[in-house]
Amino acid sequence: MLFAVVAVGLLVGALVLWVGNGVVAARQNSGSRLTALRTRDEVLDGSFSERAVAPMVQGLGRFVIRFTPSGWVGNAQQKLILAGWADRMDGNTWAAVRIISVVGSFFLWLLVQSVVEGAVMRIVIAGVCLFIGFFGPVAMLNSRIDKRRKAMEKELPDVIDLLVISVEAGLGFDAALGRVVQNVPGEISREFSRTLQETRVGVSRTDALRHLTERTDVDDLNTFVLALIQADQFGVSIARVLRVQAEEMRVRRRQRAQERAFKAPVKLVFPLVLFIFPALFVVILGPAAMNVMDSINNGSFG
């Protein structure tokens, strides 16, 4: 029965992955349909999940959104943007993912409860499955947002240093951003690339930088962008502002590292108390306790 449960779980996971790949491919190809008409043969060349399953999933999402509270779609779309998943799915697809996750957890409970005895265990398993199915996608999304923010916080000081070097070497700010996009991989480079694309299609630099903060929501990057906007409005030298921001970012990174170092002893208390100290007590006091028990059994204290 354990083999059957594992096999069914792997089958469900493979099915969800297959459907997800089709939805992502359909989402990415929708942009190309706006710029060029695709012939019938080109459409039929797509995978079955892209041609048949993805439209059904997106349709399910549009149906589910009708019963969601006001503002739920906007919040979900904003979280997808912060996670960097906006090019893969939208609010409709995310609603469908939530429904599929809950339905999948229900079928998983039906499978597991057939091999578990006891009403209490079945209720506990039902609660666990429902919790995983309902909050699992949200936890993954929030984890992705936190991971992306930490990655951008880590990359930002080095990116600003490269901007300082490029601007002081004689490049303009846009050209310096282009140099960063070409030479530095990562989340910030992708966001800077989108900012450059917006400025090339006619969006002002101020609006493009504000859109950058809306897509990232990183405190250090917000401060950096605010300084750039103020420098652009008041005519301050960009090179001087970048130099000041580079020094501030290095100080913040050092302070953040010191803060993590100060938190380390507190975080080590629980592993020490729960895992290391009991093992030490067993090793140190175990032989003494055995000698005392032997003495009591032999009547040495009598």
Image: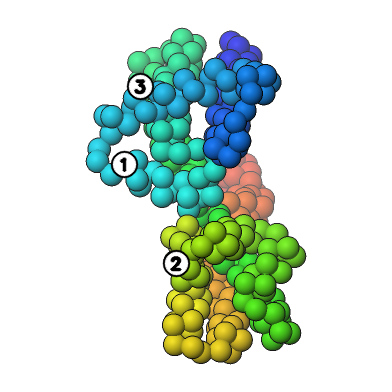
Give the residue displayed 71% in from the left and 69% down from the top: 179
Quadrant of residue 237 in the image? bottom right
Q: For the N terminus, give its image quadrant.
A: top right
Disc 2 crowd, CA 10 A, few/some/many (<14, 14-19, 20+): some
- C-alpha span from label 1 to label 3: 30 Å
Disc 1 marks a residue whose amino acid type is: Trp
Image x and y of residue 159, in percent:
65, 71
Mark before the other along the chain sequence, 1 or 3: 1
Give the residue displayed 46% in from the left and 71% down from the top: 206
Q: Which residue is mark 2?
A: 207
Residue toward you, 154 or 260: 154
Are the residues tagged 2 and 3 within 8 Å (C-beta)?
no
Question: Element type at marker 1?
Answer: helix
Disc 3 marks a residue whose amino acid type is: Ile
Give the residue displayed 59% in from the left and 24% down from the top: 50
Please state if 214 lies on the left or on the right of 153 as rendered: left
